[in-house]
Amino acid sequence: MRQLTLIRHGVTAWNKTGQFQGHTDIPLSAEGQKQARALAKHLAKATETVDLVYSSPLKRAVETAEIVFPQFEIIQDERLKEIHFGIFEGHTQTENEASELWGKWYADPFKRKAPQGESYEDVRLRAVAWMESLPELERIVAVAHSGTIQMLLSHVLGLEHPLWRKRFYLRHSSITRILFKGKEAIIERVNDARHLATSEDDPFLD
């Protein structure tokens, strides 16, 4: 049975201030690095081997991957990037809500592209294309973003917008795992963050 483990990157300063990141290349904060080290320690206890490690090329994902899997050459893939929020990046939810353009986009972000950015359908298409191109290996890991992971889960479960947004909350450095048996896909776990000692209240901003 093939196994795809999806890890959300550690927290950043912008996650804490509530600023939309998207493709803006923000590094991990000290707390995010600590989360990644805790995850590395947690995974080191497992007896499972890993064949390949992929990552979004954005710093917050690559840094997480390098901390958790220092012994691997990290394969960066553009298709694992977070949604491009366009003109909304760098701004908070409150700031964006003051814009008329935000209301038009947020009414259906799955189909509508953010101004100078993407739609979630764009993210789904590229993320699924990545998943379907993976080699036939037993255990693959990818460090990515909440939006990207949510789109992969939605695809596997056949969910349509807006159901996916209400169903999948992913903490920073959390583990989500999909098992593949032939053409059948099984969600083994979602948002596994047992390695984090404290609770976290991070916004839906990646």
Image: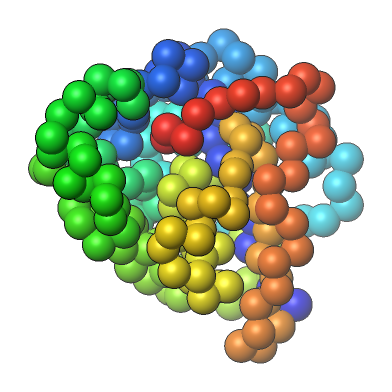
- Confirm whether residue 190 shows in the render: yes
Residue 71: image x %, image y %?
64, 39
Residue 63: image x %, image y %?
50, 29
Q: Nearer the viewer, residue 91 or 101?
A: 101
Which residue is drawn at the image coordinates 15% and 29% (left, top)? 99
* Quarter of the image with the C terminus in it: top left
Which residue is drawn at the image coordinates 74% and 37% (left, top)? 193
Q: Nearer the viewer, residue 161 or 55?
A: 161
Task: Tell whether 102 sits left or right of 162.
Answer: left
Task: Tell whether 172 sits left or right of 205.
Answer: right
Residue 176 vertical position relative to residue 182 in the rendered view, above or below: above
Q: Nearer the viewer, residue 195 or 167?
A: 167
Residue 176: image x %, image y %?
66, 52
* Quarter of the image with the N terminus in it: bottom right
Please state the total of marks drawn on the protein image: 0
Residue 194 vertical position relative to residue 3 in the rendered view, above or below: above
Residue 70: image x %, image y %?
62, 34
Which residue is drawn at the image coordinates 74% and 57% (left, top)? 189
- Confirm whether residue 64 shows in the render: no
